[in-house]
Image (cartoon, grey):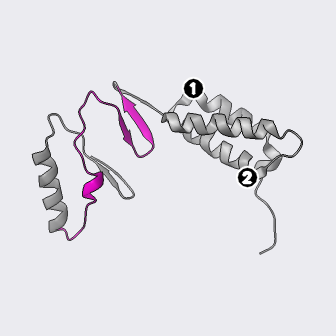
Amino acid sequence: MTVYVDDIVVTMPSASDTDLAWAQRLIAQARLTMNVRKSRVISAKSEKLITGVRIYKGGISAPAGQHRKVKALHEAIAATPGAKDVGQIRCLQGHLDHIAQIEPRFEGRAKGHRAKNRAALQPSKTPR
């Protein structure tokens, strides 16, 4: 079982809808509510997306959507070479860091982007 903030994932061999109904009853007994729309039994062989991590064939990776966002942000930043949008640079860094946490082979890309854009990624020192 994995619990992450408000997500609960139970991994078990041969899970069924009966097991899901049991979990729903258990949660209801604790006077909590469960989003039935998000509750489902997923086959061990199918691809799963759990709390921002893609699980498939025994391995984990970042979802394809994260990679598409990185590509789109790279293209948007490259389209305006003179005027650097700090918000886009920070957003891109966040996506790169997320991917690097899941897939260590992307750590170099995240570190390189951070080094290249160090000034834009510094916290702003505006008075409150």
Residue 110 position by quadrant: top right
Q: Please state if 14 lies on the left or on the right of 38 as rendered.
A: left
Question: Within 10 angstroms of label 2, few (less than 14), some, or many (20 or more) residues?
Answer: few
- State the extent of the magenta-drawn residues as a range: 30-56
Q: Position of residue 1 (x, y in %)?
A: 27, 46
Q: Is residue 11 visible?
A: yes
Closer to the camera in the image, 126 or 54: 54
Give the percent coordinates (x, y) of residue 58.
34, 26
Q: Is residue 123 above or below residue 59?
A: below
Specify which label sits upstream in the sequence, 2 or 1: 2
Task: Residue under label 1, please give it.
Answer: 105
Q: Quadrant of residue 45?
A: top left
Residue depicted at 25% across the width and 66% down the height: 33
> Given the image, on which type of amino acid does mark 1 rest?
Arg
Q: Is residue 47 magenta?
A: yes
Q: Main secondary structure of the magenta part?
A: loop
Q: Which mark is residue 87?
A: 2
Residue at left offset 65%, top offset 34%: 71
Classify residue 98 as left or right of residue 54.
Answer: right
